[in-house]
Image (spheres, helix red, strand yellow):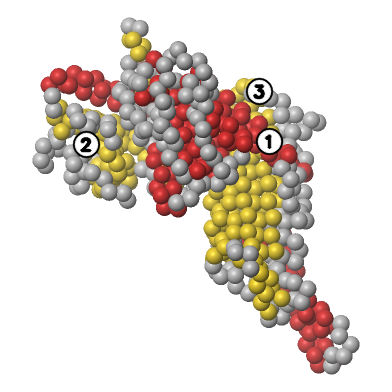
Amino acid sequence: MNEINNQNMLQVGTILHGTYKIESYLASGGFGNTYLAKNIEFDETYAIKEFFVKGVCQRDGNSTTISVSNAENTNSFELQREKFKKEARRLRSLSNPHIVKVYDLFEENGTAYYVMDYVDGENLSARLKRTNTPLAESEVRNYLNQILDGLEAIHNEGMFHLDIKPANIMVDSHNVVKLIDFGASKQQSTVGGATMSTGISYTNGYAPSEQMAQSYDKFGPWTDFYALGATMYKLLTNQDPPSVSDLSEDETEDKHLALPMPNVSEEMKKLVVWMMQVNRLKRPKNVGEIRRILQQSSVATSNNEETKVFSPHQSYVNPVNDDGKTVWTSKHGDAKVEENEQPQSKIEKQTSDDTANKNTHFVVVFILVIVVVCAIAFMTRGCENVTKTATNAVAASADSDSMWVDSTAADTMQYYGEDYSYGYHEVTYEDGSTYKGEFKNGNPHGKGVMEWPNGKNGYVSKYEGQFANGNFNGIGNAIFFGGSTYNGSWVNGVQEGYGQQTFPYDENHPEYIVQYDGNFKNGQRSGKGTAYYGNHTYQTGTWKKDELIEVTEEGTWN
């Protein structure tokens, strides 16, 4: 955990509201302190936000009670404290998997506190510092969809976050994003024609000109979208976004930021530049506009991208050359050849050798029988564990729209024979399949790309993303033979957590799904999600085992 300046923070061990014991410090910002605390009665862990304005509030010595440093600030402090409480109430009213849930609100020590979810995970700023490498575009796209879902819920309540940045985006162990730190958030309200705010703070590089100028009347969803675009730039490049110049309201020139983004698709570059327009009037106006661009680009990619066929239900074999020797290529391009103990090609040569004696022939035939029996057993086990993970219809779907993966990916992704050990390798197998990426103990582990030249309709043709012990595990983008895609979270070889599915448009069945954004469980649509249909309608609601069981919103999309 990063070092936190705990000056003016409550001491560890302090009991709040007779219920919560402070365990440690999580954060300290301009408008509040955040603590890790436990419910004494139920031994449950929470995060507690304390309203504390730096430069205005102070806590003397070991005192728990805060005081306002200047009497002239008392009225302002009390007003801001009431708005802090109002913010907590509105957050509590939100039910969204990508926004921290508020459970309790109380006043104590001369200020206010609210109790919320503690997200056991890592924020994206810490992730970048830990890895010192940009995120893959597919991973950023996955996180973006989740953030948009959370922002839409906030904006629909008339609130703006106003501090979107990597440090305020938490990712839990299931790769589910949660927006945190609403300390700078603004609640839109009108009293006697005047717009009131909880106060403005900002992070340089992520704040647009209207926020830096504290022009409250110019705030809107577009203010958050600028910060989100800057966040995407940081995630895609691991470079700090440039600070925006403060433009006058009369300036009409379209001023784009020069944003170098190597290894990023043109579609994603255009989206980032659009969101980071200096002129707020030229940014997206609502989440729906961004979603439409993402939906169009993802469908276009799935329909137009030329890929090799990759079928994860097929077992790997050692890559071999014509002499039956294992071949692999290192990251530096130098090929290495290693002897296999008893490659199948040599066994076949032995069985066809007319000069072999009868004893040797008998032994070889016996070995072949064992190999065939084992192969049949392995294939049978693989077939038994093939699990249908998605269908593209409200009712029944065509076979070409089904997506299948092997639920025992650890079995199908083993490398038999020579151990590829650790590090980066580029491997070509005798069936033409390839893997380029990181290994650990002979298995794909870390980041990598897998492709197969011979696929089966509905099976994965290409996977690019994270692996663990030979499994799809983490964030990954799969392209299926037949045109379907999945970009999102994987656990042990199946879709689990948040993700996005796309399907080719079927003109004979416009009622079929062309895109789904939402949660998955055990490879099926489960939890909250939105389905976009080929007839340009959409439905948002609760899903269970690929079926929409409760509709909370529906409409049309362009």
Separation of residues labelled 2 and 3 (CA atoms): 50 Å
Location of residue 353 with respect to 110 vertically, above or below: below
Location of residue 187 with respect to 60 vertically, above or below: above
Q: Amino acid at mark 3?
A: Asn
- The first of marks 1 and 3 along the sequence is 1
- Please identify, in this view, whether the residue under mark 2 or under mark 1 is nearer the observer: 1
In the image: residue 92, left or right of residue 263: left
Label 2, on which residue?
A: 17
Q: Is residue 205 visible?
A: yes
In the image: residue 68, left or right of residue 90: left
Q: Is residue 98 visible?
A: no
Q: Amino acid at mark 1?
A: Val
Q: Amino acid at mark 2?
A: His
Q: Residue at x 76, y 82 (%)?
A: 367
- The first of marks 2 and 1 along the sequence is 2
Instruction: Looking at the picture, tell me which residue is in the foreground, 53 or 367.
Output: 53
The mark found on residue 299 in the picture is 1
Instruction: Looking at the picture, tell me which residue is in the foreground, 525 or 515.
Output: 515
Label 3, on which residue?
A: 558
- Please identify, in this view, whether the residue under mark 2 or under mark 3 is nearer the observer: 3
Q: Give residue 101's position: percent from left, percent from top.
A: 39, 35
Location of residue 192 with respect to 115 vertically, above or below: above
